Image (cartoon, grey):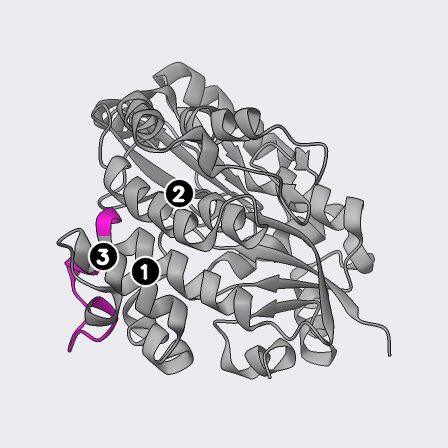
Amino acid sequence: MAKETVLVVCPGRGTYNAPELGYLARHHGGSEWLARFDAMRAEAGKATLSALDGAAKFGPALLKGDNAAPLIHACAYLDFLSIDRERFEVVAVTGNSMGWYTALACAGAVSGEHGFAIADGMGVNSQRHEPGGQAVLVLAGEDWTVDQALVATVEAAMARHGVLPSIRLGGMLVVAGSVAALDGFEKDLPQLSRSPMRLAGHGPFHTPLMWPSSDAARAQFPVDWFGQPQVPLIDGRGKVWRRFESDAQELWDYTFGHQILQPYDFTAAMTVGIREFAPDRVVLLGPGETLGGAIGQVLIARKWLDIASRNMFTARQGEDPFLIGLGRPSQRSIVIP
């Protein structure tokens, strides 16, 4: 029986929240990899992932980059290792924002240990930046389609206030800038379906204001940790890094340069993933499933599989899910035995 092909998507920050507390224990208790990650954290004098995941109550400490990043990475990476390879062939891997570091490990461009060290270290480095933050704008309507006239109006307001694009996320746009710039920008916006949401504890990610983080990463993580991806790896520009074609120095430079300092275009990454590899399904690794809406919006914008509206996407998901979210119990069992 032929294997089904899957495009794997690695989630970024904001996906480990109160409902996800205990995710590692529920799904990966006893994992040798979890024990390795715990040992690496303990050796560095940090709280282990098992301790963080096993907290009696979800609290602000679990949202900080130095804890959230390694927690999310471990959940996603261990989910990836759990996919049934007898039935599913991974044809490409991508990620959103911080999920790029997980994608590097899943694709085999760095080792499992080095992938965790990068995610863990970048959780700390991401807190080094010039003053500023991020805000999420929902540009899609109730049917998950986007009015391009609205996009043009928002971009004009961004230009007036010096606000920068941070992440292009289907029918959403994450913007970044100084607090004053974001304040003025939000007051200048047209009526949106939802008010802009300022992301607590987030810096101006994916902008030049993150140069201290980029400099720290370049000093901390050696080039020789990087190698050839074993499966195609799609970055935040939509570039595909392929086995035997990729230069380790260039991959390292992108990871700690462009990936930190320039906008992350998850929409482009997903578009390339579905068009270039035409997977039978898309697998969104846990924890959480907040990225599912953005993926659905990309499918609608591209009319992939003739899906042209939110209702059509929901109907398809109810019949035979094209998008499998491993953070959703009802779908997890489709790809994990």
Task: Tell me: 82 left or right of 241.
Answer: left
Callout 3 secondary element: helix
- The quarter of the picture where the N terminus appears is bottom right
Examine the structure image and report whether residue 31 is included in the region drawn in magenta. no
Q: Do the residues labelled 1 and 3 touch (CB within 8 Å)?
A: no
Q: What residue type is labelled 1?
A: Leu
Please name the residue shown 35% across and 80% down the image: 29
Q: Real-space Cα distance between discs 1 and 3?
A: 11 Å
Task: Tell me: 91 left or right of 59.
Answer: right
Please name the residue shown 25% across and 47% down the image: 65
Q: How dense is the environment of label 2, judged by Cα within 10 Å: few (below 14), some, or many (20 and up)?
A: some
Badge 1 is on which residue?
71
Please name the residue shown 71% across and 73% down the image: 315
Task: Tell me: 195 left or right of 167.
Answer: left
Q: Which amino acid does label 3 sit on?
A: Arg
Q: Real-space Cα distance between discs 2 and 3?
A: 32 Å
Residue closest to the far right: 1
Q: Earlier in the sequence, mark 1 or mark 3?
A: 3
Q: How dense is the environment of label 1, judged by Cα within 10 Å: few (below 14), some, or many (20 and up)?
A: many
Callout 1 secondary element: helix
Q: Real-space Cα distance between discs 1 and 2?
A: 23 Å
Between 241 and 187, the one lying in front of the other is: 241
Q: Give the range drawn in magenta.
A: 52-66
Badge 2 is on which residue?
136
